[in-house]
Amino acid sequence: AVLSVTPASRDVAATAGSTTFTVGNTGGGSLDYTSAVTVGGSWLSIASGGSGTCPPDQTLTLNYTANTGAARSETVRVTAAGVSGSPVDVTVNQAAPPAEPLALQTVVSRRTHGAAGTFNIQFYPNINAVESRRQGVRVAIATFNRNVFCAGGTCDETDIDYFVTNGGITVGTITTQGNVLTVNLSGMATPNQLFLGFSGIEDSEGQTVGDYGCIRFLSGDTDANGTVNSFDLIGVRSRLGQAVTSSNFRRDVDASGAINSFDLIEVRARLNQTIGPCQ
C-alpha cells in the first residue's frame, strides 16, 4: 500500500468556507489512515473524512473561518502506520481580505483667524458649502480613510485636479502627513467656485480616488445662503467686538481674529453679489 493525498495544497478565499483533499492508496492491498491539523488549528478544522480505509478513495473535508488579517497557512498531516509514503502533509493557504478601497472622507477650507485660532468650513461631502471669508480658500485639507502619498513621491500641483469658474488660482505647497493632504492656495476671486480633486494621490497599494469637492466662494456671505444682503450686514453689526468663536467666525470676514468695522466694509462692498450652486 502507498498513501496518497492530493492536491498538495489548496488556496482559499478570506471568507469562511470549506475545502477538500482526496486520500487514496496507489499501491496494493488496503490502508487505514488518520489525520490531524498540525500547525495552529485555531481557524482550520477537520469536518469529515479525518480517518478511514482506502480503497476506495476518501474525501477529507476541512472547514476554515473568515480571515480578517494577513494571509495565513496551516498544515494537515495524514498518517497511515507502516505504509509507504506516510505521513503526507498538505497545506491550506488562506488569502488576506481585499483591501478596503481608498476613500475621501472630508475636505475643509481652513483659515487662521489671528489669535482666535483656526476654523474650518467643510465642503466635502457637503458640496455647495460657501466660503464667506475674504480671499477665499487659502488652505484645503483633505482627509482619507488611510495614509496617502503623492504619486512619484514629491507633491506638486499635477497631483491634484482643480479649476475655478472665475479667473485663476495659484497652487502653493502640497504636503501629506498620514491620512491628511494639505493644499495651499491663493489668488481666488469672488464670487467663484472651486472644484478640487485628487487623482494623483494614492495609498501604499497604488489605489486612487475619483471623488472631488466643490466649494462656492462669496466674500461677505456670512449666513452662507449664496447672496450678500442686509442680513449679512446685520449679522456682522450685531456681533461687533465679540470674541471670535466657532459659532460666529463667519462674521470675522477678513479672518483677522476680530469682528470689527473692516468686516462691515467688506460685506457692504459685496452687497447684492450672488453665487449659484456647484454644477
Image (cartoon, rainbow, N blue to C red):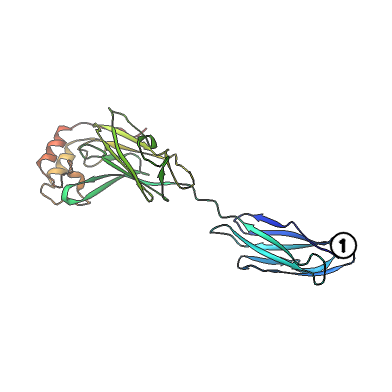
Residue placed furthest toward the bottom: 81
Q: Could you tell me residue 133's position as x and y percent?
A: 21, 40
Which residue is farthest top?
167
Q: Crowding at label 1, few (<14), some or many (≥20) Cα neighbours within 10 Å?
A: some
**171 displayed left or right of 204:** left
What residue is at 21 percent from the left and 35 percent from the top?
228
Q: Is residue 188 above or below residue 21?
A: above
Q: Residue furthest right?
A: 29
Give the structural element (helix, strand or loop) at label 1.
loop
Residue bearing the label numbered 1: 27
Numbered disc total: 1
Image coords of residue 139 (percent x, y): 28, 42
Q: Quadrant of the C terminus?
A: top left
| Residue shown at 38% from the left, 34% from the top | 158
- Indicate the quadrant containing the N terminus: top left, top right, bottom left or bottom right: bottom right
Q: Quadrant of residue 126?
A: top left
**Front-most of residues 227 and 164:** 164
Residue located 87% across and 67% down the image: 30
Q: Is residue 93 left or right of residue 8?
A: left
Which sits in the foreground, 105 or 43? 43
**Position of residue 166 in the picture relative to residue 237 (left or right):** right
Q: Position of residue 58 (x, y in %)?
A: 80, 63
Using the rendered view, name the quadrant where residue 231 is placed.
top left
Closer-to-camera residue (178/257)? 178
Amino acid bearing label 1: Gly
Residue 265: x and y in percent read: 12, 36
